[in-house]
């Protein structure tokens, strides 16, 4: 099989070819590796090749719905037994898990052939993928721009045709943001739907979940079936399942939906005309398809939600840094300055502050629930502006130097309680203010491709559903994909 033929199929289609013995798992792996070797030097999407492991797997007995399909996993939380999980950090390079994470185990049981791990910012903390240790990942649609983060390596690999679908996870938009940047489909399942074991009960106190980035809706639906088949009896939840498979439900008509939309940033920061245009374009398409669409937004205090989200983020970063220093002998110089500063803020917080921020998730969830009593879905931009240029969000050197001084003097706690710090943080989230709502409330959400800026950069839109709304999202996405097919649009892979 040649690459041109390989690229025409999604993962479901490739699995069907293997099942009919029209192509072998080894042949597919050869094409995927050849494509990776041809383009990864420009993209830096794959940071840990696993070719020998993959060849051994492809040469053995494979079963499951994706038997023989090449696959990539994210180098964060998605542990492959015996292989380091680098997490985009020098500090974690020596972490070699003894067991597969539950998502990876289920993907391997489904017959997927894992041949590499993809780039991520340090500990997935940023909406871009530019870790100091592995360098930046670039967007196949324009190499000077970001593919988003934190699943940017996976998104770039899928968009570039290395694989039709790849593993990601989403704790604040990390599947949806790169999907929006790379003209892909990205679904964040609701809280507790996908198990996180065995090393975790749930990621980031329930903010994060595993999932995939794909070119087709049916691949994501079938992958969700893989990730949700069988209970995790050691986990915190016994998730309810729909009456049919997600693959089947995705093919059912969505019916006439009530959709409320907004383009206003929940934290009051500017929204670029291109992001507004992407939503307006989607509104016109939904109206054409017979859905009821009108301006509306949940009565959620967006600034308070964002600050509560960041409280959990700071605390998690402090815990991660502390654990690696304690168990892996990591030193301060093994972490990026930005990470150390966030960890210092986390350590400066008082336990009641964290408890109250966590408790306020209830308020945010109930406000969103009130919105969903009137509307089936919420539509927003996924990003507040088109994918930024590589390096555009770098912390200036003088700010890093000032941060190091503040940490050395032990003044981080005082700084974190000032209005200046609050303004700095909200400004840094100005490019991605829309995605944290679904993480804080545990609701499913998706980014759908379709719009491109006049410069040719992708810019997806986001839909948020109520609890248990994964099937509704997939059904609508299938309708949109049928109306405006996007899977075969291929990036130029040049500036």
Image: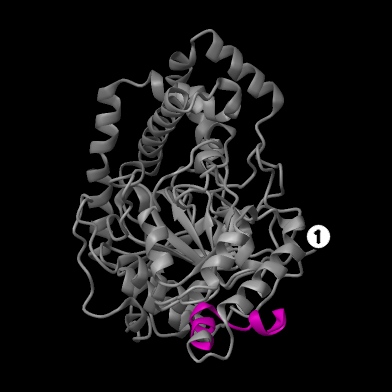
Instruction: Locate residue 130: give its quadrant.
Output: top right
Image position of 363 (left or right of 181) = left
Helix, strand or loop status at disc 1: loop
Which stretch is magenta? Answer: 1-17
Instruction: Locate residue 33: give its quadrant.
Output: bottom right
In which quadrant is the C terminus drawn? bottom right
Instruction: Report the predominant secondary structure element of the magenta stretch.
Output: helix
Disc 1 target residue: 495
Q: Is residue 139 visible?
A: yes
Residue 44 counted in the magenta span: no
- In the rendering, at what x and y percent does residue 142 appear? 74, 60
Up/down of 156 relative to 111, above or below: above
Image position of 135 (left or right of 233) = right
For label 1, the crowd category at 10 Å Cα-Cα, with few meaning under 14, some 14 to 19 and many 20 or more, is: few
Query: Which residue does the image show at 65% across and 23% down from the upper left?
Result: 399
Query: Which residue does the image show at 60% across and 63% down from the upper left?
Result: 459
């Amino acid at each position: 099989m040649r690459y041109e033929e390989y690229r025409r199929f999604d993962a479901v289609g490739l699995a069907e070819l293997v099942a009919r013995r029209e192509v072998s798992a080894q042949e597919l792996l050869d094409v995927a590796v050849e494509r990776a070797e041809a383009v990864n030097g420009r993209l830096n999407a794959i940071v840990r090749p696993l070719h020998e492991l993959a060849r051994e797997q492809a040469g053995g007995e494979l079963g499951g719905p994706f038997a023989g399909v090449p696959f990539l996993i994210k180098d964060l939380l998605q542990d492959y037994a015996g292989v380091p999980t680098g997490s985009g950090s020098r500090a974690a390079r020596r972490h070699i898990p003894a067991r597969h994470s539950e998502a990876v185990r289920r993907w391997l049981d489904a017959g997927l052939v894992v041949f590499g791990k993809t780039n991520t910012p340090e500990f997935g903390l940023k909406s871009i993928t530019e870790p100091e240790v592995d360098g930046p990942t670039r967007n196949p649609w324009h190499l000077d721009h970001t593919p988003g983060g934190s699943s940017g390596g996976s998104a770039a690999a899928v968009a570039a045709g290395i694989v039709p679908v790849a593993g990601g996870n989403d704790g604040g938009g990390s599947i949806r943001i790169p999907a929006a940047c790379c003209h892909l489909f990205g679904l964040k399942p609701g809280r507790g739907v996908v198990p996180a074991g065995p090393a975790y009960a749930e990621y980031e106190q329930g903010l994060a979940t595993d999932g995939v980035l794909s070119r087709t809706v049916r691949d994501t639906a079938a992958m969700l079936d893989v990730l949700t088949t069988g209970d995790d009896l050691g986990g915190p939840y016994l998730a309810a399942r729909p009456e049919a498979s997600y693959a089947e439900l995705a093919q059912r008509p969505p019916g006439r939906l009530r959709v409320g939309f907004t383009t206003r940033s929940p934290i009051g920061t500017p929204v670029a005309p291109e992001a507004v245009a992407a939503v307006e374009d989607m509104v016109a398409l939904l109206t054409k398809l017979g859905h009821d669409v009108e301006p509306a937004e949940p009565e959620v205090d967006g600034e308070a939600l964002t600050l509560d989200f960041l409280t959990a983020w700071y605390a998690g970063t402090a815990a991660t840094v502390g654990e690696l220093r304690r168990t892996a002998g990591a030193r301060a110089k093994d972490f990026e300055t930005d990470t150390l500063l966030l960890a210092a803020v986390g350590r400066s917080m008082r336990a009641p502050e964290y408890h109250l921020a966590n408790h306020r998730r209830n308020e945010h969830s109930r406000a969103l629930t009130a919105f969903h009593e009137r509307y089936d879905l919420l539509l927003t931009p996924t990003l507040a502006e088109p994918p930024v240029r590589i390096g555009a969000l770098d912390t200036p050197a003088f700010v890093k130097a000032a941060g190091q001084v503040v940490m050395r003097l032990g003044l981080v706690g005082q700084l974190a309680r000032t209005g200046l710090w609050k303004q700095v943080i909200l400004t840094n989230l100005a490019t991605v203010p829309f995605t944290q709502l679904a993480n804080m409330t545990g609701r499913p959400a998706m980014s759908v491709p379709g719009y491109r800026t006049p410069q040719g950069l992708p810019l997806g839109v986001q839909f948020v559903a109520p609890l248990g709304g994964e099937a509704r999202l997939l059904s609508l996405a299938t309708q949109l994909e049928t109306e405006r097919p996007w899977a075969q649009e291929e990036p130029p892979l040049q500036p």
